[in-house]
Image: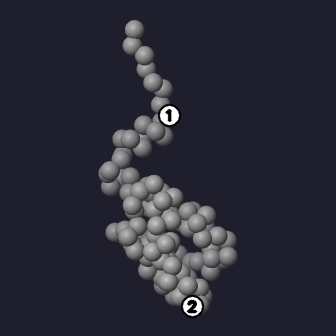
Amino acid sequence: MATHKAETIGTLLSEYFRGTEAETTLLERKIPTLWKEVLGAVVTQFTGEMEVKNGILYVHIHSAALRQQLFEQRYAIIKKLNEALNAKVLTDIRLLG
């Protein structure tokens, strides 16, 4: 008798979309939520619109001093966001005024 392993719909969909453009798009949509989790509420207060295009996260920051601090830490931020996504989605961050 054959046995079947039960899988959740989420697991099946993740496996189906793995490595596709659709997976990348879904992961990119998670970034604004992860931004708050990774960088905290204080940074989020000064954060405006966000958009991801071709692996680059464009973020509007309403404080010049904070924008400079984030610029200096951008590679660490990229690493943390990619780790939170369990995928290499981001390659750069552009901080806009």
Whether residue 69 is visible, yes or no, is yes
- As helix, strand or loop, the secondary structure at mark 2 comes to helix
Residue that extends furthest to the left in the rendered view of this protein: 20
Badge 2 or badge 1: first in the primary sequence: 1
Instruction: Look at label 1 and name its amino acid.
Output: Thr
Q: Position of residue 92 (x, y in %)?
A: 40, 74
Q: Position of residue 61 (x, y in %)?
A: 55, 82
Instruction: Look at label 2 and name its amino acid.
Output: Ala
Q: Is residue 77 above or below residue 10?
A: below
Image quadrant where residue 14 sits: top left
Pick the front one: 83 or 97: 83
Image quadrant where residue 67 sits: bottom right
Identify the residue at image location x=39%, y=13%: 2
Identify the residue at image location x=58%, y=77%: 47
User: Which quarter shows the N terminus?
Assistant: top left
Callouts 2 and 1 close, C-beta under 8 Å: no
Identify the residue at image location x=38%, y=70%: 91
Residue under circle 2? 64
Q: Position of residue 74 (x, y in %)?
A: 48, 77
Neighbor class of circle 1 (other Cα within 10 Å; few <14, some 14-19, many 20+) is few
Residue under circle 1? 8
Q: Is residue 34 above or below residue 60?
A: above
Disc 2/disc 1 C-alpha distance (Å): 45 Å
Whether residue 29 is visible, yes or no, is no
Pick the front one: 28 or 73: 73
Neighbor class of circle 2 (other Cα within 10 Å; few <14, some 14-19, many 20+) is few
Q: Is residue 78 above or below residue 3?
A: below
